[in-house]
Amino acid sequence: MSETFEVITKLFNNTRRQSKLQSGSSTDCNLRKESPCVKKERSKEMYDVPLPKEFEDIINSQLRNHVIVINLDWLSFFVKLQIAEPAIAGEVRELSETYVIESLGFGTPIYNHSWNIYCMGEKVGMLHTHSKNLTIVSVGFGKLEITNSLLYEDWYTVFAGMISALNIENVHGITRLDIAIDGTKHIFDFLNKFARQNPYEQVSIKKLGKAAFDAKRMDTETMTFHNFKVGSAHKQVVVYNKSRELEKSNKEYIRRNWIANEINPEEVWRTELRLDSQAIKGIEALEHPKTNEMLPGINIEMLQDKQYLFRIFKSYIRNFFEFVTTDKNINRNKSYFTKIDLFKNLQLKENLYKSAKRIVQRGVYKAKMSIHHTVQCVLLNFFERTEDVVAAFKHLNNTVQTYGLRRYYEKKIDNWIRTYISPFRSQEDITNLRLIAIPIDEYH
């Protein structure tokens, strides 16, 4: 049967070859062989169409050397390690003089157990172990995550310490990588114009690639969108107002990072690239920002380098989050038009915020409740003795400083005073309450 199939295949190929020769298509075959070269030569013939004025004004609105700052915002790894299951929920294990892990008593949809990792008493990561489904994750493998706050400081030293303390045998790869660029309001303005442009104009802006473009939450008064997303679950770029998001979260370390890099924290727009393990595997090599050497895949140690992060960002948005100016009079595919450089004249700042005293992240919600309750008791005159009032002030000051809640307190205190003020409360106490958020060493 197989011999018969081979004979038929040979006959079919010979018949096709003869028919091409008889029709004089041998020259066509030669042209087809040369077509890649011809195509490559044609691809150099790019069409440079001037930007429409409204888009050009947005791009030119960036001052020369406009400051942006780039950071990792999520980093997790697939690791191989041997660790015993926790005996009870909340079990604490001392790995070294510096590192401790604590069982949370629950897991994830994929892992049975989750652990907090502490370095010198501060939470620096999470570990997920003991797979629920061995067909998905084999025995002896888990996921290691670095906390968001650590990524805005010198994270690699602590990460190396975690690897050593946990006796991790191998880091098999990155499971998720988010790279955030802050200070990109011009991209937000550009995308709003892009989403609302007239598609019937002769000159228009087109997005390269087939990734979905999603504009979200339109403000009906200004007719502008608040958020944008390009891509799918494996790879996506999101653009949003990070300053507004920080009003809801307790991430003051990000605000301090902006200030350290001379970025006004009141209105900061973020452009964020999010990659999962499948997208990360798609890249073959990246150029070293200093030596120009080509490094295979993503080098974990090099993720400390801001220029390296910028190269990863630009590599992954190629033909995905890129735009061109097209002209309907030029009958060409959009890939033949010159790309719009959304990152020209940008100065990349590389300062890290290094806090002398780390801000506690655990228990922030309870800390806010405690502050609110204490202020309420002071204003309603629940404390009769002077010593109790002084102790309340000390408690407020310590809680605000420990949890980095100065902005939260300053925003709330005036409203609390109006709501709870007692006629018997002295003006001096009210003044002292307003000064609570100021660190002791700032008093004159």
Image (cartoon, grey):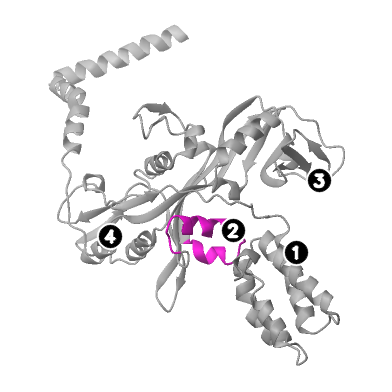
Q: Position of residue 220 (x, y in %)?
A: 44, 77
Query: Few, some or many C-alpha atoms within 10 Å of disc 2 (few <14, some 14-19, many ≥20)?
Result: some
Residue for badge 2 = 251
Question: Helix or strand or loop: what does disc 1 sit on?
Answer: helix
Is residue 243 within the magenta segment?
A: yes
Are the residues flagged by discs 2 and 1 in contact, CB closer than 8 Å?
no
Q: Which span is picked out in magenta? A: 241-264
Return the disc, 2 or 4, that comes first in the chain's sequence: 4
Specify whether 409 is left or right of 65: right
Q: How far apart are marks 2 and 1 (CA)?
A: 16 Å
Question: Helix or strand or loop: what does disc 4 sit on?
Answer: helix
Where is 43 relative to 377, above or below?
above
Residue for badge 4 = 59
Comparing 438 with 373, the one in front is: 438
| Circle nearer the viewer, 1 or 4 | 1
Query: Few, some or many C-alpha atoms within 10 Å of disc 1 (few <14, some 14-19, many ≥20)?
Result: few
Query: Extreme bottom residue here?
Result: 423
Res 13 label = none
Q: Where is residue 291 in the image (x, y as percent from the top left)?
A: 35, 29
Amino acid type, label 2 = Lys
Amino acid type, label 4 = Ile
